[in-house]
Image (tube, grey):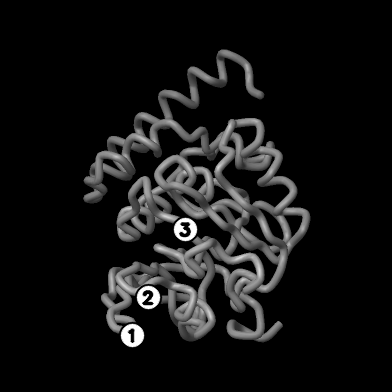
Amino acid sequence: MHGRENKDKFGVAREQMLRLDLKGRNITNPDVLKVMAEVPREEFVPESYLSQAYTDGPLPIGMGQTISQPYIVALMTQELRCNRNCEVLEIGTGSGYQTAVLGKLVKKVYTIERFPQLSESAQAVLGRLGVSNVEFYVGDGSCGWPESQLPPSGCFDRIMITAAVPEIPEPLVRQLADGGFLVVPVGYGGVQELVACEKKAGKLIEREICDVRFVKLLGEHGFEK
């Protein structure tokens, strides 16, 4: 999509991101680092923000939504503890950048976005990049994946919520397999707590990671509009 000069420039910026913003901040999972080196973030960033594609901060993508900073994408992915056999539910497709990162690490990604325009744009970019193990759905992510369209197992090995929730939505807890992991920003204010959860015997065991800032997840089991 971009010329050779830009590709060279983005390549240098991507390498700097890996060295300073990821490896320099305790992103150690080799699979996560490899994928973050492969996925071109510039493809998911609006044209007017291309010069900031590898800046370690969020960028607007329209509809009041953002693409998360690279460090947070890597951190949440690392905390999700994915493997090639995982079926992952992502709540909040957004630009599709996090979706692409997950898609290169797992068996299949199921992703929900409430804004049709963002879902369509993400589908176009992922299609162009050849990321084909993703199923898209437009709707209320706080309600989980439609029950009639769940994977054969009836649940997901991993769930990532890429927008803040006041509390973890119960439908998503139900759709997480026992022994599975969920990563989510939780909190009512402008700053939330990133939480990693493991489901054991039907209940979530939570571990706080760090403070984060995410847009709110609107929906029946999220924030009111």
- Amino acid on which the number 3 mark rests in the picture: Val
Residue found at the very far right of the displayed protein: 117
User: What's the residue type where badge 1 is placed?
Assistant: Lys
The percent coordinates of residue 70 (x first, y second) are 43, 47
Q: Would you say the residues marked 1 and 2 are in contact, meaning their CB atoms lie under 8 Å apart?
A: no
**x 60%, y 69%: residue:** 145
Residue 117, x across and y down, in percent: 77, 54
Residue type at tag 2? Glu
Q: Secondary structure at mark 2?
A: strand
Residue at mark 3 to residue at mark 2: CA–CA distance: 22 Å
Q: Residues within 10 Å of mark 2 (few under 14, many from 20)?
A: many
Q: In what quadrant of the picture does the C terminus appear?
A: bottom right
Q: Which residue is mark 2?
A: 193
Splitting the image into 4 quarters, where does residue 191 fall? Answer: bottom left
Which numbered disc, 3 or 2, marks the residue closer to the eye?
Answer: 3
- Tell me how far mark 1 sits from mark 2, CA to CA: 19 Å
- Give the labeled residue for mark 1: 203
Residue 88 disc label: 3
Which quarter of the figure is the N terminus placed in? top right
Quick one: label 3, few (<14), some, or many (20+) residues within 10 Å?
many
Name the N-terminal-most of marks 3 and 2.
Answer: 3
Sequence-first tag of 3 and 1: 3
User: In terms of secondary structure, where does tag 1 sit?
Assistant: strand
Taking the spot 61% from the left edge, 83% from the top edge, the residue there is: 223
Residue 19, given in percent of the width and then of the height, sits at 28, 35
